Amino acid sequence: MAARFSGSSRMRRALRQTTRAAVSRPSVIPAPSGGWNVRDELDAMHPLDAVELTNFFPTDGGVVTKKGYASHATGMTGDVSFLAEFDAGASRKMIAGSNGEIWDVTSDGAASSLASGFSSDKWQHAQFDPAGTALMGLVNGTDAPQTFDGTTVTGMTISGSGLTPANLVGINVFKSRTYFWDGISQDFWYSSVNAMGGTLTKFPLGRVSGFGGNLVAMGTWNVDGGDGVNDMAVFCMSSGDVIVYNGDDPGSSWALVGVYRIGSPLSVRSVVKLGNDLAITTSDGYVPLSRVLPKGRVGVETVSDKIIDEVLRVTQKYKANYGWDIIHYPHGKMALFNVPVSTTKFDQHVINTSTGSWAKFTGWNGISWSLLNDELYFGSTDGVVYKADTGRVDGTADIHAIGQPAWDHLGARGLQKNAKLARLVGKTDATSLVYKLEVGTDFVNPTGQPDDVSPAQAGTLWGAAWGSAWPDESRIIDRWETVASLGDAFTTRVQVKSSTVGFDWYSTAIVYETGDMI
């Protein structure tokens, strides 16, 4: 008996040594403040990046739902294809182009017509103060150029050798001169000092460019060469040539800095100042000019590298659509690159200008964009100017935000894990939040789709199409939910859909078990 007992004990000890009990472990997945990433392989993505980030905006330490928009100026019809701010000290106005008229849309409510009888609403503008009087110049490639002085729209006095004024489609101000181009040649025309229009002088860029193409866009680039900031004139050709000049007078003191090659610019509105840099929307992506020199097209790092595959897709698919635009919105710490998906649908690729992190916005169907008193506005295709980045509703529609962080091996690559619990951690600006939290495994994305559910209402219980509402007054969201997922790599997918509340997303967490199974 003693021998049999001794053998049985040794067997039990051996069995305990070869069989490990399952161990529960928590793992925190931070909110993807690194932004949207469609460039890197799923298994090589930075842990702060996102596989998807739609209508969430990445901040310095987390992710927040975007705000909505609300009606601002009404009474127009058709596309509001032009929107611009007139800024002259205490006098700040916003004007719009729609239905063959130029409108004052500064105030909430009905717009006021300033001028009519135009054939096109696709105006470009530039403003400066010749002789101490602020003027905005307007051209659209079809109608005679106009000026706006803050009160009245009048025809611009303009002439020049080889110039058809109504053909002028672009305008820019550089070192106290106005510059114009028609988009159908390699030429530009420039004014005398401190003149809006007047008698212009022709400058043939074709003698410089080696690749052909027509002049599409112009910008002013502020370059710090070590002895102070120096302004340079930048000309973007349809061939992809970027021609850079330095100097005050194209007729005498200009010096050619260089000719560089990038992707072709997509529209006359393809250039915008971002701080001291110039951002250019091209067929190769969104290019900051500071990274072009001296690399040129080969080897240049675009500002949109993390989303380059998506940018290349949309620029090729929608390049002929009207509405490509860039707007720098300093108050919101963002720049928006407008993507005209169709004649009525517009998405935005949005970059946090402080961190360089990307997101995608939908629901703001803006064909034209402007600031007014540092706030963001867009012109729509329904004859209305809307104020953006305000409130918690897109007009009358819910804001539907979706975020999926990078895939995570939870600190144990190659080890099979059994996820048991998951939670979303963040803060809401109301006493409840309705959301949907899913867990994906081994690079198979969660299957929940936006069309699977109806708009959520506060108070929906967990287990319905959308989950988790809290009746208490706490604004911190932090509650474990039961899941069942088996695999090596995991991700979470968060969906928030609301017309009343916003959400600051801090992290998600997963509790999983490891260990040999008997």
Image (cartoon, rainbow, N blue to C red):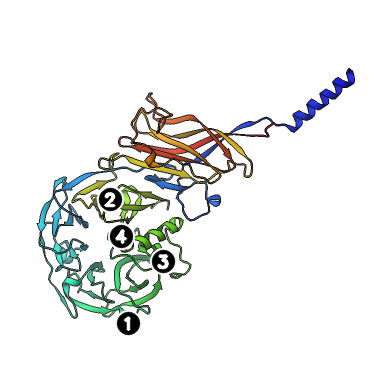
Q: Residue furthest bottom?
A: 207
Q: Is residue 421 left or right of residue 109?
A: right
Callout 1, which amino acid? Arg
Q: Which residue is mark 3?
A: 226
Residue 394 in view, yes or no: yes
Secondary structure under tag 1 reads helix
Snapshot quadrant of residue 460: top left
Q: Is residue 3 left or right of residue 515?
A: right
**In the rendering, which numbered label is found on residue 207?**
1
Secondary structure under tag 4 reads loop
Q: Earlier in the sequence, mark 3 or mark 1?
A: 1
Mark in the foreground, 2 or 1: 2
Measured in 3D between alpha carbons, the distance from the residue under mark 1 to the one under mark 4, in whole angstroms, is: 29 Å
Residue at the location (22% across, 53% down)?
A: 381
Q: Residues within 10 Å of mark 4 (few under 14, many from 20)?
A: many
Measured from the top left, where is residue 137 in percent x and y?
A: 18, 64
In-front residue for pair 207/379 = 379
